[in-house]
Image: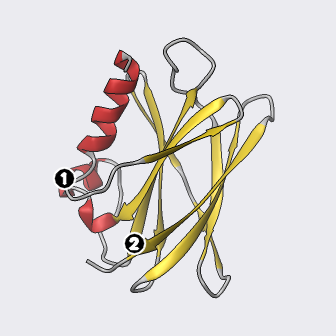
Amino acid sequence: MNIKWLLLSIVLLSLLTPAVQAEQSKRLGPWEVHYNAFNSTLLRPEMAQQYNLERNAYLATLNIAVLAANEAGKPAQQVKVTGYTMNPLSMQSRLEFQEVIEGDAVYYLSQAEFTANEVLRFFITIEDENGNSQELRFSKEFWVN
């Protein structure tokens, strides 16, 4: 594990309480995309305040980090991240991402509403400055804490 990835992992984990499950990752074209979606009540209050995130039993928090998979050390990438969620009734809700840069780490945060025991499908588009894009899709079941 290189120092940049270690630093990024520490930053991401510092946002969460120990009860949060591990992040996931996918290789999408030239990128290694790390993502995690969890109930916002698992955020530590001081971290939620620092990043202007709300803690609410019916609110999910999404964290995405994009690394250059083909470059030595897999440096963090600044990209454009857009997307939406879809609930089981196919209702869509747009995600608004904020970019966070801390040292060599770059990650993108957003929040989405859900109802009790609901599966949300995430549709995330990642685009570089040249217009090259990849789509990240995943589902996650949320429970009210």
Work out whether residue 63 or residue 24 is closer to the camera in this orientation and state it: 24
Q: Residue at x 32, y 25 (%)?
A: 7
> Which one is earlier in the sequence, the residue at label 2 or at label 1?
1
Residue at left offset 81%, top offset 35%: 131
Q: Residue at x 37, y 78 (%)?
A: 58
What SS does tag 1 mark?
A: loop
Question: Horizontal and vertical percent for residue 76?
Answer: 51, 26
Vertical placement of residue 87 versus 94, above or below? below
Q: What's the amino acid at mark 2?
A: Leu
> With respect to residue 67, does 17 lie above or below?
below
For mark 2, does the 10 Å Cα neighbourhood hold few (<14), some (14 to 19), or many (20 or more) residues? many
Q: Nearer the viewer, residue 119 or 79?
A: 119
Q: Which residue is mark 2?
A: 59
Q: Amino acid at mark 1?
A: Pro
Residue 114: give its label.
none
> From the viewer's perspective, is the residue at label 2 or at label 1 nearer?
1
From the viewer's side, name the closer residue of 69 and 54: 69
Secondary-structure class at tag 2: strand
- Residue 18 — which label? 1
- Dividing the image into 4 quarters, which one contains the C terminus? bottom left
Left or right of 50: which side holds 110?
right
